[in-house]
Image (spheres, rainbow, N blue to C red):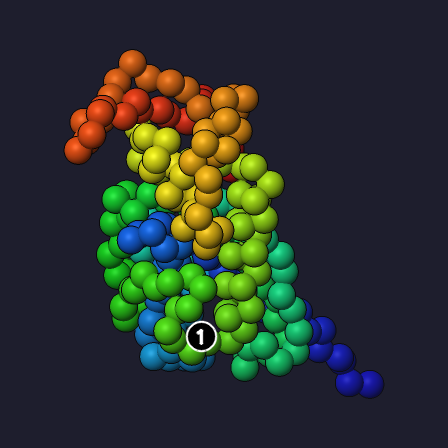
Amino acid sequence: MNATRELFPLVSVDIALFSVDQSRLQVLLVKRAEEPAAKQWALPGGILKPHLDDSLEAAARRVLAHKVSVELPLVEEVCTFSGPDRDPRGWSLSVLFYSLLPRDQVNALVRNKVEALEWVDASSPGHRLAFDHAQHLTAAVAKIRGKVDAGTLPLHLLPEKFTLTQLQRTIEAILGRELDKSSFRRQLKSSSDLVELDEYERGAQRPAQLFRASDGFLF
């Protein structure tokens, strides 16, 4: 009697790392250096290693740190993609995460198994993405837009100290639409996520008050 070989799915993690630049929501893509999908653009990702990763979130943090020098203050799961045809190596499942970072804190240096990095428009990346990463990106964008639309403030995308104008422009970049300034500021008055500072940023007009995120804030 022939022994049957038990097959296990390939388990991986992928990360949509978002930032805001020039009033647009952007995402980090990597150009893969190895097969499968060598020379193609994709979200940063890698294989789960049970001897190194005590959770899928830990795997996501390890994978991104291994490929680009980015330390993530926030990592949140979006959803899972699975099936026999999404990866040429066989039946696989990938758990998608997203993260938010201020652009000035992203020191993205090419590391292992990556040929190049590029920040692209999250709604129109301008590249054909490897595997099913176009679906990944769509799901991740929908996730953060839904949270922001429901009133969650994307403070992880802002510098440590910021103005309300900067916050409004960041939210507009995520949602892809302009907000009424008066209505927006009225809604913020009841927010416990913002801390007023006795500091001001000088501008072309009158100085603008600075704020920071409250201690323990989570997006």
Is residue 218 visible to the viewer in this orientation of the structure?
yes
Instruction: Identify the residue under disc 1.
Output: 129
- Pointer 1: residues within 10 angstroms few (<14), some, or many (20+)? many
Q: In this view, does 150 lie to the left or right of 141?
A: right
Q: Going by the image, does 73 lie left or right of 134?
A: left
In the visual, does 199 lie left or right of 165? Answer: left
116 above or below 155? below
Q: Position of residue 183 (x, y in %)?
A: 50, 33
Name which residue type carries label 1: Leu
Residue furthest top in the image: 198
Residue appearing at x 43%, y 36% in the figure: 181
Indicate whether 25 appears above or below 72: below
Question: Is residue 142 left or right of 62 when viewed as pictured?
Answer: right
In this orientation, which residue lies closer to the viewer: 106 or 47?
106
Towards the viewer: 168 or 41: 168
Residue nearest the viewer, comparing 28 with 34: 28
Circle 1 sits in a helix, a strand or a loop, which is it? loop
Q: Residue at x 76, y 80 (%)?
A: 3
Tell me the residue at 53%/29% (across/down): 187
Name the residue: 58% across, 77% down.
Answer: 86
Is residue 71 in sight in this rendering? no
Q: Picture quarter containing residue 120?
A: bottom left
